[in-house]
């Protein structure tokens, strides 16, 4: 046991603290935040929305992976230096069914099985649309997204679920609509939301959709791509949609037989190249494929075009990150989970060569940047990161990378704080690319509550300029959005 103790001393956190932040939050709240450390900037106005699993158990029956947990939306509306918090579960069909029966009625994609062993699970191939991955606001609609099914529309003020949204008939029942839309700040003079849906098997079909600011469909096209495609995210430039097709295969037998969740049947093939797929946004020009080093990507930071080249910045893992043999997420061995790093792929459109460069070696995830720089050459990137420079661990820090100088700024909530996805918010009227704030939700295990930290984006290292302290914890989230509309009650004015 001496070895174990010795290695524990190098950890920046206690496992129990980290696990505490995953506990289910069954309650739904609405209150003005009265515990504020520091000051909310007077010119910061709008609403931050966040989605993530609100449950990690169903009446005490533990989920194997938090990604199988029902989506719960949190919002903080900010105006005049004041803030109002609210949270609500998305009323999906599955959430309502399980709330009524009090037990798991579905299998989870990430390995949660219904009670009763394989017999109870075999041939149950239904998907539970858990609406837990992202929440975006576009065309006056607040949408909770989960990549394998349709979006749920919510009321941005009350967070009440309005229902499944088929996007004016664009989607059919059961159609996939990815959880990572991209927002082009300037497509011939107006912004666009660009998103995709993928149907995969032996070959894959990628559908691409572009929406005008009023939420109407501007343009759609469909492409067939050889092989199985696990596509969680993509990147855009003014002319291209860019996907990374990870070198993975899918053997559905253990899933069909009731032994494993669908995502546990994904196999990484380290001898196969990762493919970068370039789909022209005009929908008519040729789709091109570029081979690069084997790696696994969930998230992209950004992409841009330069003479004869496309640059793509992505968070890369050496391998597909799984729970390995751990019984569930809480016992996962971080030393056995591949670490994520920021890689830059430079694709030469003439020679088809792809140059790979590691930009950030510290384990990092959840990149965010200035919204006006999406698809354009950019300078600053913000990400969740580990406290230590090398070892894989929960995200406890916030890192800012200056692409021009290579310099990094870091702030860490270790040992007792745990973070996740930051969001960059530009200061109204600001000129510099980093003139604004970075908003970061983190779990303070010492106080057993979640806080929203607000940083001056130009000066990350000294720590937050304000901390908005909730009265309780909310389980670690996945993705969220900031919108400049204030969706709080009038009373908070
Ligand atoms: Co994601």
Image (cartoon, rainbow, N blue to C red):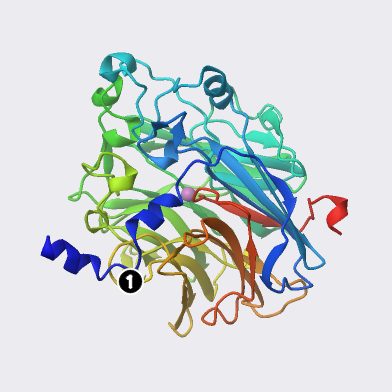
Q: Is residue 219 visible?
A: no
Q: Residue at x 54, y 42 (%)?
A: 25
Count of picture labels: 1
In this view, 237 is above or below 66: below
How crowded pointer 1 is (Cα within 10 Å; few <14, some 14-19, many 20+) is rated as few
Q: Residue at x 74, y 50 (%)?
A: 31
Residue that badge 1 annotates: 361
The spot of residue 143 in percent (x, y) is 65, 40
In this view, 120 is above or below 345: above
The spot of residue 254 in percent (x, y) is 24, 25
The spot of residue 41 in percent (x, y) is 74, 73
In this view, 203 is above or below 210: above
Q: Residue at x 34, y 30 (%)?
A: 262
Q: Quadrant where the N terminus lies?
A: bottom left
Between residues 231 and 220, which one lies in front from this camera angle?
231
Give the side of residue 253 with respect to residue 41, left or right: left
Q: Residue furthest front?
A: 447
Between residues 92 and 247, which one lies in front from this camera angle?
92
Q: Is residue 162 visible?
A: yes
């Amino acid at each position: 046991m001496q070895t174990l103790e010795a290695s524990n001393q190098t950890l920046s956190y206690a496992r129990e603290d980290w696990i505490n932040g995953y506990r289910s939050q069954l309650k739904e709240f609405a209150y003005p935040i009265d515990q504020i450390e520091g000051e909310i900037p007077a010119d910061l106005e709008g609403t931050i929305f966040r989605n993530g699993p609100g449950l990690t158990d169903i009446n005490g029956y533990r989920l194997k992976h938090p990604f199988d947990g029902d989506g719960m939306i949190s919002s903080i509306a900010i105006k005049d230096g004041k803030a109002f918090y609210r949270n609500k579960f998305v009323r999906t069909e599955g959430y309502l069914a399980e709330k009524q029966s009090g037990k798991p009625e579905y299998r989870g994609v990430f390995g949660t099985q219904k009670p009763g062993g394989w017999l109870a699970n075999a041939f149950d191939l239904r998907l539970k649309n858990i609406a837990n991955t992202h929440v975006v606001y576009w065309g006056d609609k607040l949408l909770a997204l989960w990549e394998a099914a349709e979006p749920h529309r919510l009321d941005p003020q009350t967070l009440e679920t309005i229902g499944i949204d088929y996007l004016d008939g664009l989607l059919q029942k059961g159609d996939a609509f990815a959880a990572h839309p991209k927002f082009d700040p300037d497509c011939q003079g107006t912004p666009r939301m660009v998103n995709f849906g993928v149907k995969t098997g032996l070959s894959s079909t990628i559908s691409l959709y572009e929406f005008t600011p009023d939420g109407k469909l501007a343009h759609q096209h469909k492409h067939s791509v050889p092989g199985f495609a696990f596509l969680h995210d993509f990147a855009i430039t003014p002319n291209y949609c860019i996907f990374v097709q990870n070198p993975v295969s899918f053997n559905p037998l253990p899933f069909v037989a009731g032994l494993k969740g669908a995502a546990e049947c994904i196999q990484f093939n380290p001898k196969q190249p990762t493919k970068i797929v370039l789909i022209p946004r005009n929908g008519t020009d040729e789709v091109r494929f570029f081979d690069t080093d084997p790696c696994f990507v969930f998230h992209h930071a950004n992409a841009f075009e330069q003479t004869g080249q496309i640059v793509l910045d992505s968070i890369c893992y050496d391998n597909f990150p799984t729970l390995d043999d751990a019984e569930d997420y809480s016992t996962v061995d971080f030393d056995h989970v591949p670490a994520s790093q920021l890689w830059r792929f430079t694709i030469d459109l003439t020679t088809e060569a792809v140059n790979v460069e590691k930009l950030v070696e510290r384990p990092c995830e959840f990149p965010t940047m200035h919204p006006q720089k999406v698809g354009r050459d950019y300078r600053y990137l913000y990400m969740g990161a580990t406290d230590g420079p090398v070892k894989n661990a929960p995200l406890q820090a916030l890192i800012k990378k200056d692409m021009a100088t290579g310099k990094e700024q870091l702030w860490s909530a270790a040992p007792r704080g745990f973070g996740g996805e930051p969001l960059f918010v530009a200061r109204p009227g600001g000129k510099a690319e980093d003139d604004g704030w970075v908003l970061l939700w983190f779990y303070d295990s010492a106080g057993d509550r979640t806080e929203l930290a607000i940083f001056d984006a130009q000066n990350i290292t000294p720590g937050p300029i304000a901390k908005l302290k909730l009265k309780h914890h909310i389980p670690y989230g996945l993705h969220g959005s900031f919108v400049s509309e204030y969706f709080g009650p009038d009373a908070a004015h």
